[in-house]
Image (cartoon, rainbow, N blue to C red):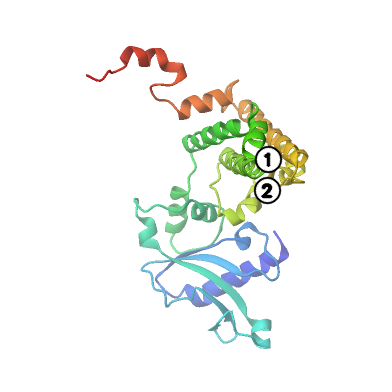
Amino acid sequence: MTPATKEKRTQLTQFIREVLAPFPELVGVVGIGSIGTGRCRPDSDIDAVVFLDPLDLYIVPAEAIWVPQTDTFHSIFAESETLAAEGIPLDFLRLDFQLWSKPDFVWPEARRAELSQGWLAYDRDGRLAELIAARTAYGEAEQITRLDEAITWLDQHLNWDAPEQNWKALGPTIAHDRLHAAFQYLAAALFAYNRRWLPWRNRQMSALLALPWLPDHFDDWVLLANNAPSLDKVGYDRRVLALRTIFDDILRQVRQDGLYGDDPIGAAFIRSHEEPGRSWNMATFNERRRKAE
């Protein structure tokens, strides 16, 4: 945790105590972004999700500069020496706790990622912690389903002679785009292996690098896997090598953990395409085939 994170968590705690907690509508507050991950810089805003029941948008602003000495809010575009010296920049997402508590209300995946990895700064009666735990649970079935999808697509993008044929038949622009897709499936596999929800796309790399498990020497390969060192065939081939190296490490790890047997690619494909009319059940299909009358 950075020193700036400690300072800003103290500031948010003060704000909750002095401004928010007196309102009975407040259910809880979760610090997200850098204050949640512990990577605040001195110039970071305080990002948080404020759950209210009922929702009242006049309790606290969405985005403002708060001055503790006067308990006043100011526009983020206001410029003054006083605000620069004494103001605390706040960026709040105000949510309706009743709505987010409904069983049929779908939580966006990136919001699940934020809340599951956030800092619970305040929870009036424990309801918020219970809700977040229930709605952000990441079970084994979810993990395997996502791993199956990622492994299947990675095999199609990286194995055999797919990269070579893409370069020859489709040209550099589309071939590189296929590698972009491969990197996204690579990231999806790593998030799934670690049982973490996918974050907002612009925060993906930060969250990816902070995952509990990453392949050995991941830092040495990830930049090259995501960016070709040159636009020619040499640069393309180096990027393919980086992607394949990381993919092989993932396959080795899921076999070692017992999540898959000796053939993760085959198992992933069959499990995610279990339906009549596939190569492994064609005999049964022919036996039961229906013909038009």
Q: 43 and 180: which one is in front?
A: 180
Amino acid beneath label 1: Leu
- Marks counted in the figure total 2
- Residue 15 locus on image (x, y percent): 55, 74
Dot placed on the residue nearer the N-terminal end, 2 or 1: 2
- In which quadrant of the rendered view does residue 237 lie? top right
Question: Residue at point 47% right, 55% down?
Answer: 129
Q: Which of the numbered marks, if any, corresponds to residue 47?
A: none
Amino acid beneath label 2: Leu
Quadrant in which the N terminus appears? bottom right
Residue carrying label 1: 214
What secondary structure is found at the residue carrying circle 1?
loop
- Residue 223 locus on image (x, y percent): 73, 47
Q: Is residue 136 left or right of residue 225?
A: left
Q: Is residue 25 left or right of residue 220?
A: left
Question: Residue at point 56% right, 52% down?
Answer: 199
Q: 61 and 29: which one is in front?
A: 61
What secondary structure is found at the residue carrying circle 2?
helix
- Residue 232 locus on image (x, y percent): 75, 43
Residue carrying label 2: 209
Neighbourhood count class around disc 1 (C-alpha, 10 Å): few under 14, some 14–19, many 20 upward? some
When the figure is inspected, residue 157 is found, relative to residue 66, above or below; the finding is above
* CB atoms of marks 2 and 1 within 8 Å: yes
Quadrant in which the C terminus appears? top left
C-alpha gap between disc 2 and disc 1? 8 Å
